[in-house]
Image (cartoon, rainbow, N blue to C red):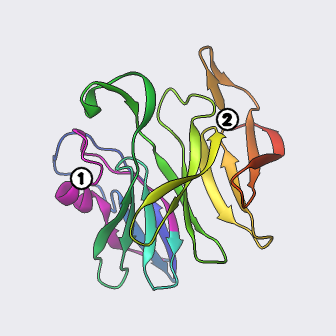
Amino acid sequence: TIYATVGGWHSSMGDEVNLENYAGVVAITDGEVSLVGNLWAHELANNPDGTDNLETHPFGILAGSDGLLYITDAAANSLISLDPMTGETATVAVFDALPGVFPNPMRGGEMLTDPVPTAVAVDADGNTYVSLLSGAPFIPGSAKVVQVAEDGTVSDFALGMTMLTDLKSAPDGNLYAVSFGMFTEEGPVFNSGSVLRILPDGTSETIIAGLPF
């Protein structure tokens, strides 16, 4: 069975959505697709990040050794667990806002931007890590990788990165991250994407540079 996230954005403050598999997790078995988790329903019932905006965007997914699926919700700014057998969801962790450069109407007008979690990975020791894209305007160096403890406590692990979209634990014991690219005041910088190796002490080094988004 293959499990996949179906992304979606919706900020109409609770309106019904009539789209097949909207903002959910699906199972694909023998070519047949079925919905096993409804993250839009989880957002409506829980609003994990507590902002004034109700929206959800299931993005990263990881199969845990405990039989649960772990999903990063890039719009609800949280890590969600899902039992694919029952559809039961639970909020594992919520990621704090990051410093922003303009008032955020969804966060009380404070100078904050969303963390936007993108991927979840587990290392050989069972430690859980989540990459953050960071919200607009994607300030270079504002993205990071955080570690999530079993009790949901979030702590910084690797700082100073930009627009992280994926994260994997590799056989060499290191984490590898994808940096989508870089935006400046003039807009996107072409061929500024990269692949980064993140060492156990949280420092990172560029392995592949010059990628076009």
Q: Is residue 70 above or below residue 195?
A: below
The residue identified by callout 1 is 47
Q: Residue at x 45, y 69 (%)?
A: 70
Q: Amino acid at mark 1?
A: Asn
Q: Along the horizontal axis of the image, is 157 left or right of 39?
A: right
Q: Secondary structure at mark 2?
A: loop
Q: Residue 77: say if magenta.
A: no
Q: Amino acid at mark 2?
A: Gly
Q: Secondary structure at mark 1?
A: loop
Residue 6 is at least partly visible in this image: no
Q: Is residue 48 above or below residue 122?
A: above
Q: Nearer the viewer, mark 2 or mark 1?
A: 1
Q: Residue at x 50, y 55 (%)?
A: 155
Q: Residue 40: say if magenta.
A: yes
Percent coordinates x, y for residue 46 in the rendering: 21, 58
Q: Nearer the viewer, residue 171 or 125?
A: 125
Q: Quadrant of residue 21?
A: bottom left
Q: Nearer the viewer, residue 189 or 34?
A: 189
Q: Is residue 72 above or below residue 213?
A: below
Percent coordinates x, y for residue 152 in the rendering: 39, 65
The residue identified by callout 2 is 181
- Stretch of the chain drawn in magenta: 32-61
